[in-house]
Amino acid sequence: MTAVAALVGVTFASPIALKSDAFASVGHRLAGDKGHQVEVETVSAGGFTYDMPTTWGRLGASSVGAGNQDGAGTIVAAVCPSGDSGSACTGDVQVSFVNYRGGAGHELPLVSSIEDTFDAEFKVKLPGFTKVEASPKSAADGTRWLRYEFTYQSKGGLRREVLGAFRHTDGSGVIAVATGPDAALRKQASAIDRFLLGATEDVAEAAAAE
């Protein structure tokens, strides 16, 4: 997880803080049609809310490390597509959220240009980097975000990552980082895509920032 934090931090020239107890807010809301509404658990990070599948687990930031708390980007939560054991994911895939507060020097690039930023940094910093796909998507509420998938070589073999970059108009936002061994992440890819596509922007928070 430390490697992922450093990677995202370097990309935007903004240090990452691992805040030991800064878990993203967790809530519940009703989902489904009026005749079949059920309460689902939600995870909110960086001003966006995601519905978490019932089989997934979740970790607090304390489970992925702790460190300097002065960073512009902050790892606030992680969710586990294969479930969790309390302090770690039971499987090999993890989706972490890195919040960016926005402001001069700390804003996320526009969705239309962030792909170029990823390309330039990853080619230099990741051995065997190969971009698989990069495409803009529309979240559940119409918010535009970038899905960026790539592979690279590590000591443990081929790694695959999917980044979901969500940005508010003030430059704040969040990057969801899904990472794991190539085969393991391929198995979870569809579920992770549905999870990211279901994002909704926190309207009250976005209005307060303007």
Image: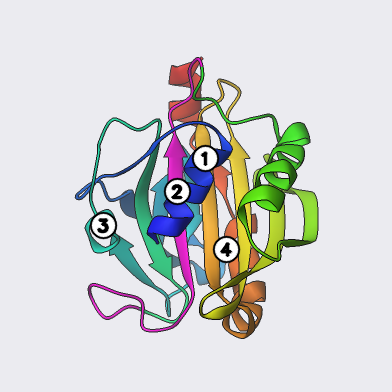
Circle on res. 195: 4
Magenta-tinted stretch: 84-104
185 is higher (above) or lower (below) than 129: below
Whole-percent x and y of residue 120?
A: 72, 42
Q: What amino acid is found at the position of numbered circle 1 in the picture?
A: Val
Which residue is label 3 attached to?
65
Q: Is residue 187 visible?
A: yes
Whole-percent x and y of residue 159?
A: 60, 73
Mark closer to the chain start, 4 or 1: 1
Circle on res. 31: none
Mark closer to the chain start, 3 or 1: 1
Q: Nearer the viewer, residue 116 or 202?
A: 116
Left or right of residue 61, residue 129 in this image: right
Asked whether disc 1 touches disc 2, contact meaning CB atoms under 8 Å apart, the reply is: yes
28 is higher (above) or lower (below) than 205: below
Q: CA distance from mark 4 to mark 1?
A: 26 Å
Q: What amino acid is found at the position of numbered circle 3 in the picture?
A: Gly
Query: Callout 4: helix, strand or loop?
Result: helix
Q: Tell me the chief SS of the magenta region.
A: loop
Left or right of residue 179, residue 40 in this image: left
* Residue at (19% x, 49% y) in the render: 21
* Residue at (49% x, 55% y) in the render: 50
